[in-house]
Image: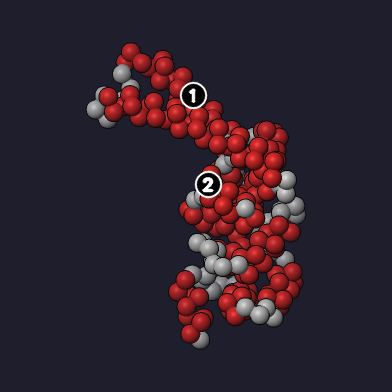
Amino acid sequence: MHVDQLTDFAWTFDVVHPDPERRRAAIERERGYQKEWARHHAWIVRQRTAEGGGGCPMGLLAEYDQVHAAMRDAYDRMFAAPIWHYLSSATTPEELAPFTRHAVLYLRWETEYPDEWAALGKSWAAKRHVLRTLAALGPTPETHGDLLGLVDAAIRREHRCEDLGYVKVARALHGPSVRMIVDWAEEDLDGLVRLRAGYLRWALDHPAAPVTPASWRAWLRG
């Protein structure tokens, strides 16, 4: 995917728009692409099953190529297309930087509208991969503020699957800003929030230490 193609994905940011009608339109657009992909994929599976699990019948090769191309076209228009490019492309961090907004958008969608995210975009594996990649490549100037907000939200909400990855992301952000978030969270009335903030402070103070469920449990015991 070329950076110029990102203009075709401006609609994806409407999934976190405060106007419910804007969100609904974006969701229906994404649902349409997913249904289109699924319809073409189901046709290919039927043909392969009819051949005993092998390839497509010789008489349907031309149609198979057309359906496969249509399936790829639907995939390339989906919400996730720029995200998967960010996660899987073997290009330089500088070339990937414009795609960072879409990776962060995936996390914002889960954080701000979790039910809508769960209906169409839920993948704990994808969330884990996004968080790991963001931690490795770091933020861009335009995504740094959103990532600070996501780290703060992860500390303060009920724990969700793969939220531990935000600790690694926090290490890649502006240190004083993250520590300000930690300071505020450690004053929270909720004891779990204070514990998460304390663990994050420990992780910042020990940047080489592993961030894992085991290290979290060890920190709690210590």
Which residue is nearer to you in this view: 4 or 75?
75
**Is label 1 or label 2 in front?**
2
Relative to residue 104, is residue 164 drawn left or right?
left
* Crowding near the residue tagged with mark 1, few <14, some 14–19, many ≥20 C-alpha atoms within 10 Å: few
Query: In the image, residue 150 lies at what x, y percent?
Result: 66, 61
Occupied quadrant, residue 43: top left
Q: Which residue is mark 1?
A: 69
Q: Amino acid at mark 2?
A: Ala
User: Relative to residue 96, is residue 202 depicted above or below?
Assistant: below
User: Relative to residue 36, is residue 207 depicted above or below?
Assistant: below
Residue found farthest to the front:
21
Q: Is residue 65 visible?
A: yes
Judging from the image, what secondary structure is the residue with disc 2 in?
A: helix
Occupied quadrant, residue 190: bottom right
Which residue is nearer to you in this view: 89 or 154?
154
Identify the residue at horizontal 69%, vertical 45% (top origin).
Answer: 20
Give the alpha-carbon distance from disc 1 to disc 2, as whole Å. Answer: 26 Å
Identify the residue at horizontal 45%, vertical 74% (top origin).
Answer: 214
Query: In the image, residue 41 lies at what x, y percent?
Result: 42, 30
Q: Amino acid at mark 1?
A: Ala
Q: Which residue is mark 2?
A: 119
Relative to residue 9, is residue 118 drawn left or right?
left
Query: In the image, residue 162 lies at what x, y percent?
Result: 51, 61
Q: Is residue 97 visible?
A: no
Relative to residue 87, is residue 25 drawn left or right?
right
Which residue is nearer to you in this view: 154 or 20?
20
**Colour scheme of this structure image?**
secondary structure
Sequence order check, earlier mark of 1 and 2: 1
- Indicate which disc residue 15 carries: none
Identify the residue at horizontal 45%, vertical 22% (top origin).
Answer: 67
